[in-house]
C-alpha cells in the first residue's frame, strides 16, 4: 500500500497521537513536593540509569506539544504521576502537582492536541508499594480516592484510562523480575496482581459512571498474541496456556466481567503446575460485572507476539535489557518456552516484528468481546539505537517508518473489515526513559539529546506529519 492509499484510508477525525508516560518523560522526580514512586530507590540501588532528567517534559512540555502540533498530531497520551498529587498516595493534595497538570492540559488545548490521560502507568507511590502494592487491597481503596479526586479536579480532561498494561506490570514485577520488587516466577503474586488491578479499574469505572461524568473512560491492555511453533497439538496447548495468562484472563475480566470456565481451566492448570493460587473474594466478580459493559473504549497496546513450544522443565529467564541481540531466553514451567520462528525479524531487544499479530488481535477482540466498543491503538512502535546526526540534522529511522507503516496497514485492514478502531498513538512522542532498558532504546518521533535536552527531528516524524495533516 502506498502512502497515498493510507491517506485515503484514514478517516477524518481519526485520532493520530504520540504516547508518553509521566515517569518516563517528566524527570523532575524530586521537585515541587513530588513523592517517591516504587522506582526511585530501586533505580538508585541498581545504579544503571537515573530517571532524571529523562526528557524533562516537566519543563519542556510546551516545546514538545508545539512539535506535536507542527508534525500533524492531534492527540497525546500522558499519565498523571500519582505522587505529584498525593506524595504518599493518600492524604492532602499537593497544590504544585495539581497546578502542573492544569498547565499541561491548558497547553494541550492551545496546541489543538487532545489529552488521553492514564491514572497509573507503572508508578505506584512508594508508601503503597512498600505495603504490598496491588497485592494489598488498601492500594485499591487509595487508587479509587485518587481517581475520584482527578475526575473532579481535572474537568478539562474528557478521555481517561485507569491503568496502563496490567499484565506488563504484573509480569515484570513477579515473573520476569526486572521491575521492583524483582520476584521471579512468583506466579501467585502475578495472577493476584492482575485480578486486583482489574478490580481497581472496575471500581473506578463504576464510580465514574455513578457520578455521571460526561467524558469517556477505559483501560489499556497490551495484547501479545501467542502462536505455537512448530504447529502441533502440544505446542498449541502451550500457546493456549500462555495466552490465558497474558491476554485472556484480563480480557475476560474486563469485557465479560467474569473469567469463563474455559479460561479458568487453563489458568488453574498453570497455577497447579507452579503451586500457585488465586484468591477471589466475595463481591469481586459483581464489581467486575458491573463495569464490564461500561467501558467507553479500549486502549490496545501492541508490540509483538510470542512463538512458543511446550516445556516441562523448571522456569528460567534471561531478560535482554541492553539491546544485545539474541541474549533473551524465557521458559515457564508447565506453560511453554519462547522459540524463534524462522523468517520473523527481531529488534536488537529480541522483540518479534509481526504486524499480522495486531490484525489478529483486533479481529479477536471484536469477535470474542462484543462489549468492547471503540478501540484505540494506544501504543505501538519500535525501539532502536538511533544514530545522532548533529544539531539540526534529520535522523534517519527508516526501519521505524517501515515498522509503523506495516502496523498502521494492519489497523486499516481490520477497520476495513468492520473493527471499530478510531485512533493510533505511536510509542513514543519523543525519546524517553525505558524502565528496564534505560536510554539507548529509543522509540520517539523526536530524538532527545539527553545531554542537552535538545530535540531533533527523525524521518518518522515527517512520515507521521504527511498522514496527520490530512486528518485535521
Ligand atoms: C509498554 C509500556 C511503556 C513503554 C513500552 C516500551 O509496555 O506501556 O511504558 O515502556 O512498553 O517498552 P520498553 O520501554 O520496555 O521497550
Image (tube, rainbow, N blue to C red):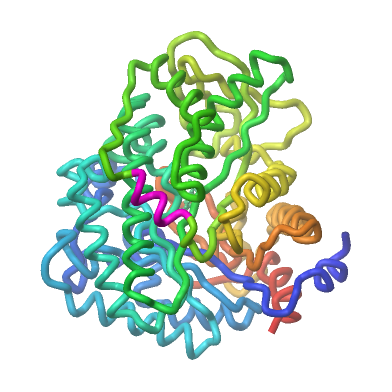
The reply to whether residue 451 is in sight is no
The answer to which of 117 and 326 lies nearer the viewer is 117
Task: Say if 466 sits above or below 2 in the image.
Answer: below
Q: Is residue 30 left or right of residue 408?
A: left
In the image, residue 76 lies in the stretch drawn in magenta: no
Task: Say if 365 sits above or below 173 in the image.
Answer: below
Q: Position of residue 465 (x, y in %)?
A: 70, 75
Seen from this angle, which residue lies furthest left? 91
Tell me the quarter of the image containing the N terminus. Answer: bottom right
Tell me the quarter of the image containing the C terminus. Answer: bottom right
In the image, residue 287 lies in the stretch drawn in magenta: yes
Q: Position of residue 234 (x, y in %)?
A: 64, 13
Residue located 40% across and 71% down the image: 57
Q: Position of residue 129 (x, y in %)?
A: 21, 46
The reply to whether residue 352 is in sight is yes
State the extent of the magenta-drawn residues as a range: 285-292
Residue located 46% across and 49% down the image: 254
Seen from this angle, which residue lies furthest top? 313
Q: Is residue 351 left or right of residue 83?
A: right
Q: Position of residue 144 (x, y in %)?
A: 26, 61
The answer to which of 466 and 270 lies nearer the viewer is 270
Residue located 59% across and 64% down the image: 425
The answer to which of 206 and 428 lies nearer the viewer is 206
Quarter of the view holding residue 95? bottom left
The answer to which of 325 and 247 lies nearer the viewer is 247
Q: Main secondary structure of the magenta part?
A: helix
Q: Is residue 129 left or right of residue 335?
A: left
Residue located 35% across and 48% down the image: 286
Amino acid at each position: 500500500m502506498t502512502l497515498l492509499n493510507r491517506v485515503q484510508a484514514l478517516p477524518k477525525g481519526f485520532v493520530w497521537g504520540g504516547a508518553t508516560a509521566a515517569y518516563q518523560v517528566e524527570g523532575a522526580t524530586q521537585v515541587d513536593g513530588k513523592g517517591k514512586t516504587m522506582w526511585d530507590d530501586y533505580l538508585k540501588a541498581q545504579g544503571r540509569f537515573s530517571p532524571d532528567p529523562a526528557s524533562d517534559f516537566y519543563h519542556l512540555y510546551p516545546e514538545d506539544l508545539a512539535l506535536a502540533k507542527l508534525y500533524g498530531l492531534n492527540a497525546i497520551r500522558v499519565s498523571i504521576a500519582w505522587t505529584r498529587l498525593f506524595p504518599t498516595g493518600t492524604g492532602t493534595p499537593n497544590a504544585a502537582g495539581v497546578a502542573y497538570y492544569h498547565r499541561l492540559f491548558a497547553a494541550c488545548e492551545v496546541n489543538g492536541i487532545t489529552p488521553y490521560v492514564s491514572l497509573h502507568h507503572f508508578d505506584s507511590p512508594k508508601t503503597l508499594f512498600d505495603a504490598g502494592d496491588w497485592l494489598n487491597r488498601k492500594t485499591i481503596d487509595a487508587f479509587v480516592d485518587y481517581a475520584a479526586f482527578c475526575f473532579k479536579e481535572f474537568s478539562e480532561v474528557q478521555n481517561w484510562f485507569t491503568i496502563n498494561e496490567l499484565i506488563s506490570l504484573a509480569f515484570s514485577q513477579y515473573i520476569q523480575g526486572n521491575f521492583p520488587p524483582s520476584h521471579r516466577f512468583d506466579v501467585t503474586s502475578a495472577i493476584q496482581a492482575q485480578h486486583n488491578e482489574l478490580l481497581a479499574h472496575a471500581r473506578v469505572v463504576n464510580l465514574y459512571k455513578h457520578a455521571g461524568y460526561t467524558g469517556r473512560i477505559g483501560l489499556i491492555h497490551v495484547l501479545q498474541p501467542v502462536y505455537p511453533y512448530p504447529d502441533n497439538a502440544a505446542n498449541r496447548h502451550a500457546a493456549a496456556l500462555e495466552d490465558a495468562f497474558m491476554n485472556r484472563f484480563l480480557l475476560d475480566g474486563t469485557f465479560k466481567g467474569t473469567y469463563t470456565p474455559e479460561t479458568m481451566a487453563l489458568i488453574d492448570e498453570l497455577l497447579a503446575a507452579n503451586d500457585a493460587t488465586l484468591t477471589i473474594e466475595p463481591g469481586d466478580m459483581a464489581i467486575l460485572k458491573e463495569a464490564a459493559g461500561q467501558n467507553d473504549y479500549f486502549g490496545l497496546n501492541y508490540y509483538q507476539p510470542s512463538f512458543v513450544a511446550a516445556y516441562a522443565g523448571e522456569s528460567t529467564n534471561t531478560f535482554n535489557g541492553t539491546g544485545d541481540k539474541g541474549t533473551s531466553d524465557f521458559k515457564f514451567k508447565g506453560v511453554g518456552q519462547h522459540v524463534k520462528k524462522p523468517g520473523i525479524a527481531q529488534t536488537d531487544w529480541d522483540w518479534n516484528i509481526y504486524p499480522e499479530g495486531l490484525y489478529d488481535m483486533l479481529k479477536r477482540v471484536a469477535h470474542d468481546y462484543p462489549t468492547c466498543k471503540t478501540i484505540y491503538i494506544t501504543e505501538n512502535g519500535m525501539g532502536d539505537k538511533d544514530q545522532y546526526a548533529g544539531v539540526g540534522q534529520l535522523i534517519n529511522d527508516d526501519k521505524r517508518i517501515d515498522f509503523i507503516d506495516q502496523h498502521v496497514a494492519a489497523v486499516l485492514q481490520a477497520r476495513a473489515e468492520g473493527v471499530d478502531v478510531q485512533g493510533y498513538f505511536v510509542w513514543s512522542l519523543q525519546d524517553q526513559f525505558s524502565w528496564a532498558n534505560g536510554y539507548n532504546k529509543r522509540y520517539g518521533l523526536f530524538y532527545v539529546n539527553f545531554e542537552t535536552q535538545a530535540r531533533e527531528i527523525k524521518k518518522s516524524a515527517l512520515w507521521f506529519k504527511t498522514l496527520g495533516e490530512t486528518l485535521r
